[in-house]
């Protein structure tokens, strides 16, 4: 009985300290849990170990790979159909014409196709979980040093463009351009 009370008390103390932590503190605690080496950075291997399979969300035929068609049909996370910006109120902007909508859709598809080709590292026309993970890691690695800091894991601010993006060398590129994982 004393052990149960002790464990319950420790659990409540841990929960209360986590729930009273500031958002930045919680983010740091989460980062520390991902940083299994304890070096203050997240390596590509740690990133892979702690991430979910990025193919599952887009892989409509369940073959473990994402085709261009599946990629183009996929919905970006965080966006829901019918959702219109912050506040959801009326805008003073005129509604776009059918021609403007078609032009915007064509530009979006062109950008998506370019992103697909960029992520298709082996050029086989299909994206594997490793290819998607490598591209995501590289986009998040704002300083290009091959590891992620707690700051780089924070979501980008919506007010302006983030510093993320651009092509850099692949994680583990110092080992002949391979990530070390197959």
Image: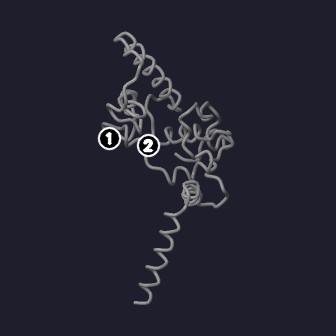
In the rendered structure, the answer to whether residue 52 lies left or right of residue 40 reads left
> Local crowd at mark 1 within 10 Å, few (<14), some, or many (≥20)?
few
From the viewer's side, name the closer residue of 148 and 128: 148
Q: How many labels does the image show?
A: 2
From the viewer's side, name the closer residue of 59 and 20: 20
- Above-or-below relation of 154 to 22: above
- Above-or-below relation of 53 to 9: above
User: What residue do we see at 55% from left, 61% from top?
Assistant: 21
Q: Is mark 1 on a helix, strand or loop?
A: loop
Q: Which residue position is annotated with label 2? A: 54
Label for residue 74? Answer: none
User: What residue do we see at 46% from left, 42% from top?
Assistant: 129
> Local crowd at mark 2 within 10 Å, few (<14), some, or many (≥20)?
some
Q: What element carries label 2?
A: loop
Single out the mark in the foreground, 1 or 2. Answer: 2
Where does the N terminus fall, quadrant-wise? bottom left
On the image, the x and y values in percent for residue 23 come to 54, 54
- Above-or-below relation of 48 to 113: below
When asked about the image quadrant of residue 5, the answer is bottom left
On the image, the x and y values in percent for residue 140 come to 58, 40
From the viewer's side, name the closer residue of 108 and 118: 108
Seen from this angle, which residue lies furthest bottom?
Answer: 2
- Above-or-below relation of 176 to 166: below
Label for residue 62? Answer: 1
In the rendered structure, the answer to whether residue 28 lies left or right of residue 13 reads right
On the image, the x and y values in percent for residue 118 come to 53, 28
When asked about the image quadrant of residue 56, the answer is top left
Disc 1 from disc 2: Cα separation: 12 Å
On the image, the x and y values in percent for residue 89 come to 37, 30
- For marks 1 and 2 on the same chain, the one whose residue lies earlier in the sequence: 2
């Amino acid at each position: 009985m004393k052990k149960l009370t002790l464990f319950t008390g420790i659990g409540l103390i841990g929960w209360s300290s986590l729930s009273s932590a500031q958002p930045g503190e919680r983010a740091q605690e989460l980062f520390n849990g991902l940083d299994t080496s304890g070096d203050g950075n997240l390596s590509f291997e740690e990133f892979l170990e702690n991430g979910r399979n990025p193919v599952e969300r887009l892989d409509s035929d369940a073959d473990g790979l994402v085709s261009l068609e599946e990629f183009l049909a996929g919905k970006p996370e965080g966006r829901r159909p019918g959702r219109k910006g912050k506040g959801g109120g009326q805008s003073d902007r005129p509604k776009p014409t059918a021609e403007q909508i078609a032009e915007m859709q064509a530009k979006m598809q062109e950008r998506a196709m370019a992103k697909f080709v960029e992520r298709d590292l082996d050029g086989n026309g299909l994206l594997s979980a490793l290819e998607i993970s490598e591209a995501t890691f590289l986009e998040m690695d704002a300083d290009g040093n091959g590891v992620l800091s707690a700051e780089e894991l924070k979501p980008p601010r919506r007010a302006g463009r983030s510093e993320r993006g651009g092509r850099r060398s692949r994680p583990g590129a110092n080992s002949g351009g391979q990530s070390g994982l197959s």
